[in-house]
Image (spheres, rainbow, N blue to C red):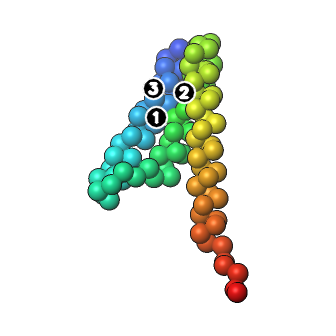
């Protein structure tokens, strides 16, 4: 197996995870009969995006490098916002 073949596999793995996030979102939405974006969507976005970023760096493709790098910032930000919201919901409320 050549280095090129291994990197092609890495690239397809990243793209597969990135595509799979839409299936997860679709299933979650169908189950609730309304549009839902589950937390797993953002984790799959981040992991798939970072794997694809590694592939883009290997390929030295500035278009895909910039797109995936900026996308990763958005995915992390959404995960931080979700975590903060969860902490706010579970925090004890002060007694009046």
Q: Distance between the residues labelled 2 and 3?
A: 8 Å
Disc 1 and disc 2 in contact, CB within 8 angstroms: yes
Q: Which of 1 and 78 is in front in this view?
A: 78
Could you classify mark 2 by the number of other residues whose Cα lies within 10 Å: few (under 14), some (14-19), or many (20 or more)?
many
Kindly report which numbered mark, 1 or 3, lies closer to the viewer in this rendering.
1
Disc 1 and disc 3 in contact, CB within 8 angstroms: no
Point out residue 42 in the picture as x, y percentages from the top left corner: 52, 45
- Position of 31 compared to 14: left or right? left
- Circle 2 is placed at which residue position? 52
- Circle 3 is placed at which residue position? 12
Could you classify mark 3 by the number of other residues whose Cα lies within 10 Å: few (under 14), some (14-19), or many (20 or more)?
some
Point out residue 2 in the picture as x, y percentages from the top left corner: 53, 14
Could you classify mark 1 by the number of other residues whose Cα lies within 10 Å: few (under 14), some (14-19), or many (20 or more)?
many
- Circle 1 is placed at which residue position? 18
Point out residue 74 in the picture as x, y percentages from the top left corner: 60, 38
Residue located at (59% from left, 49% from top): 79
Q: Under tag 1, what secondary structure?
A: helix
Q: Under tag 3, what secondary structure?
A: helix
Residue located at (50% from left, 52% from top): 39
Disc with the residue nearer the chain's start (1 vs 3): 3
- Position of 66 compared to 29: left or right? right
Above or below: residue 90 compared with residue 36: below
Kindly report which numbered mark, 2 or 3, lies closer to the viewer in this rendering.
2
Disc with the residue nearer the chain's start (1 vs 2): 1
Residue located at (58% from left, 41% from top): 75
- Quadrant assignment, res 63: top right
């Amino acid at each position: 197996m050549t280095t090129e073949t291994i990197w092609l596999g890495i690239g397809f793995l990243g793209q597969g995870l990135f595509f799979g996030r839409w299936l997860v979102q679709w299933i979650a939405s169908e189950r609730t009969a309304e549009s839902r974006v589950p937390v797993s969507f953002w984790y799959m976005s981040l992991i798939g995006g970072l794997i694809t970023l590694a592939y883009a760096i290997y390929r030295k493709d500035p278009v895909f490098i910039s797109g995936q790098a900026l996308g990763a910032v958005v995915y992390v930000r959404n995960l931080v916002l979700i975590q903060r919201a969860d902490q706010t919901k579970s925090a004890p409320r002060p007694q009046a």
